[in-house]
Image (spheres, rainbow, N blue to C red):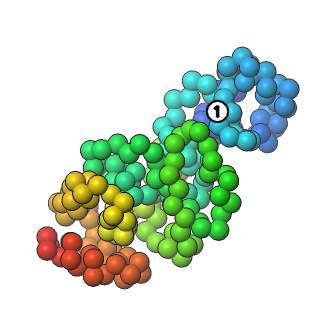
Amino acid sequence: MDRKDIYQALKNNGGILRTSELNKLGLYSRQINKLIEKGDIVRLKRGFYELSDNTYPEEVVIARLFPNAVIFLESALMVYGYTDRIPSSWQIAVDRNSEKSQYQIDYPIIDVFYMESKLLGVGIDTMQIEGVYVKIFDRDRTICDILRYENKIEREVFSNAIQRYVKDPTKNIRRLLKYSEVLNLKNKVQTYIGVWL
């Protein structure tokens, strides 16, 4: 199998292939190790490989590695244009009962927040990037999250996000209030957002 076939298979799978997917292509541990030695592919973590010159955005890599993870907090702020600051790591929310060791990876750099399943399911949106569905909390849920984690966020990032959300014509105040009740943040939402509305 030549590089072109591997490249096509990777392209069809969001830039990442699992060991089992490489096996289906007729590549087993010896061939996989040869490809790594030649520098054609890179092992991301146990059982996951990508092309060495991978051009896929990091959020696509995250979605392929952790399909149930949700882009969260400052990473979501960046996606929505509510901050100009690029976070040093991708913040993702995952089920608190998931196996913690799977998130120990070198690339991309991630910061994992463990949540109850019922909270993890509130306000999820998806965006399609390079043919891969990436989960992200919608903008209204993201504002609730920054209110919840206010002490983990720099003051300037926090206030910019609130102001940009208030000016955003696509915001949904009804949904924001609904989420604030579910997430037990009603008073904070009224304190911080209520003054602007």
Circle 1 is placed at which residue position?
50
From the top left corner, tell me how far across and down residue 34 is, in percent.
79, 21
Helix, strand, or loop for circle 1? strand
Q: Residue at x 38, y 45 (%)?
A: 87
Q: Residue at x 54, y 76 (%)?
A: 118
Query: 66 left or right of 127?
Result: right
Q: Residue at x 61, y 25 (%)?
A: 52
Task: Look at the picture and state if 100 lies above or below 41.
Answer: below
From the top left corner, tell me how far across and down residue 111 is, in percent.
50, 52
Closest to the observer: 97 or 120? Answer: 97
Classify residue 158 by image quadrant. Answer: bottom left
Task: Look at the picture and state if 103 lies above or below 187.
Answer: above
Classify residue 195 by image quadrant. Answer: bottom left
From the top left corner, tell me how far across and down residue 68 is, in percent.
59, 59
Closest to the observer: 27 or 48? Answer: 48
Closest to the observer: 135 or 87? Answer: 87
| The C terminus sits in image quarter | bottom left
